[in-house]
Image: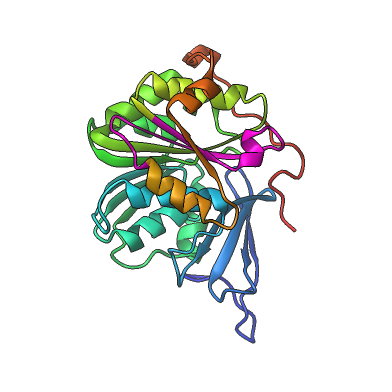
Amino acid sequence: MNDQVSRQANDDPVPVSRAVDHGVAKLMPDVDRERAWLLTVDGAPQSYVDLDEPTHLEFEYARRLGHVLDTVAGPGRPLDALHLGGGALTLPRYLAATRPGSRQDVVEFDHGLLDLVAECLPLPAGAGIALHAADARAWLEAAPDDSADVLVADVFGGSRVPAALTSLAYARQAGRVLRGDGVYLANLADSAPFGFLRSQLANLAAVFEELVLIAEPAVLRGRRFGNAVLAAAHRPLDVTALARRTASDAFPARVEHGPGLRRFVGDARPVRDEDAVPSPEPPEGAFGIG
């Protein structure tokens, strides 16, 4: 297969399926976009990437993460980024395209998955993206102080965030690695009564002064299970710009912050390492395809 996905004799791309360290990964071509691919692991969608248009973010949660990345610094300014969780490297590719010259480290626990993506969906030359097959929490704990402008956590073991990344101690490590004006970003999933999501916000509130939650209104109203993007920093985030951008998406989201977000968190308490648990199991079909 070398450096590109398999193609039939008529040059149409065909799906690629391979056993990786933690399941079966499949790359499926998008019939509507010539070099776009959906990555699934054990049937659960993980990433979508368009090799010709890396700024195209198909998944709504990825688009919301992209909105935050667009607003954390002046347009085009390079950033030092640490990504916990690799997938098909959608956000690292996006950042490399929108902020050329950025230096990025991507930490992915599944070595086989990392090899598959690097082989079949190669990064462009000079992208400034270094790939590391390692445990996310261990890598974070070994990372230097004040070494990242942004830290993006999008780590799922199957369809759940591992317990090691859900505690206050983890949040403190993230705060240590970020620079004073750095921004922490996370993709999580939950449903009413939001015990997990509220605990994660409580963790971040114990480390950072500013918090933002971005999610679809139907999710926040408890009508369905869904993704929520969290952003945290020691400085004010551009809530006005985020609200404008997320409201104009195909599936508009709501931006919660300040008193409204504090009411949402309520009496939730930070989570000790010994009490940490993975994120909730999604209901059947919550993130299915087809």
Relative image position of residue 248 (x, y in whole percent) = 51, 56
**Would you say residue 284 sits in the magenta stretch?**
no
- Residue under the point 39% across and 41% down: 239
Front residue of this view, candidates 265 and 94: 265
**Would you say residue 231 sits in the magenta stretch?**
yes
Front residue of this view, candidates 52 and 226: 226
Relative image position of residue 2 (x, y in whole percent) = 48, 70
- Residue under the point 68% across and 32% down: 222
Give the side of residue 108 with respect to residue 98, left or right.
right
Q: Quadrant of residue 133?
A: top left
Q: Is residue 200 above or below residue 151?
A: above
Q: Is residue 181 above or below residue 201?
A: below
Front residue of this view, candidates 263 and 290: 263
Whether residue 141 is visible, yes or no, is no
Q: Quadrant of residue 172?
A: top left
- Residue under the point 42% across and 30% down: 137
Looking at the rendering, the stretch of residues picked out in magenta corresponds to 211-238
Give the side of residue 111 with respect to residue 238, left or right.
right
